[in-house]
Image: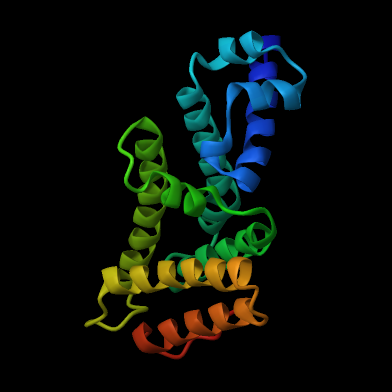
Amino acid sequence: MQKGQQTKAAIVEAALGLATQIGLEGLSIGVLAEVTQMSKSGVFAHFGSREEMQISVVREYFSRFEQEVFYPALHADRGLPRVQALFGNWMKRVAVEIQSGCIFISGAVEFDDRPGPVRDALAFSVQTWLSALYRAVVLAKQCGHLRSDADEQQMAFEIHGLILALHYEARFLKNPGSIERANQGFSNILARYAVTPVTLN
């Protein structure tokens, strides 16, 4: 990368670290200038606005999510093995986010009723991921791994619900055993929808 791109990447990296702690709304040009030891004008020049800086953080966060959760799962066989891989990778990421926080969740709280480009970027990222999860479930049914009467949308909804519940239980309430309960919940989902009993790896 050119020097300008490297500098911008370093600023986004710092912003990403801050956003997991104080939320996207807590980010400002001034705060980033202080953290990166740059001038406010220097930070501003790379984004043009606080809003664009926030969007850059959302995009980087989603890119890392894809690299850690989605793309590795494509190496798994089509059908339930891929759904299992997606959930397993997601759980690994959540195990870290329980300590650091999740921008998708905190961002949903900050921007749920605030229309604009930042909310659009957050919603697009989450919808893209949930669409990928849904497609994996549909493919599992097409492969004959799910019952013929299985509701693909309901199954994807329940898997997403487990992750949201896990964040709330483990990060906010700090209830012990939350990860184990989420894994058990996923096993229960498979038991209801799969053609044959499936053992979670």
In the figure, 74 relative to 140: above or below?
above
Viewer-nearest residue: 180 or 42: 42
In the figure, 57 relative to 187: above or below?
above
Q: Position of residue 60 (x, y in %)?
A: 56, 36
Given the current orientation, which residue lies at the most extreme right position?
37
Kindly indicate the quadrant of the structure image that contains residue 200: bottom right
**Colour scheme shown:** rainbow
Kindly indicate the quadrant of the structure image that contains residue 98: bottom right
**Residue 9 visible to the viewer:** no
Viewer-nearest residue: 132 or 109: 109
Residue at (69%, 32%) from the top-left corner? 14
Q: Position of residue 86 (x, y in %)?
A: 51, 63
Given the current orientation, which residue lies at the most extreme left position?
149
Viewer-nearest residue: 38 or 178: 38
Residue at (41%, 42%) from the top-left corner? 122
**Residue 94 visible to the viewer:** yes
Q: How many marks?
A: 0
Name the image quarter holding the C terminus. Answer: bottom right
134 horizontally vs 54: left or right: left
In the figure, 160 relative to 107: above or below?
below
Residue at (50%, 13%) from the top-left corner? 48
Q: Position of residue 16 (x, y in %)?
A: 63, 37
Name the image quarter holding the N terminus. Answer: top right
Q: Position of residue 119 (x, y in %)?
A: 37, 39
In the figure, 4 relative to 157: above or below?
above
Residue at (62%, 71%) from the top-left corner? 170
159 horizontally vs 41: left or right: left
Viewer-nearest residue: 139 or 150: 150
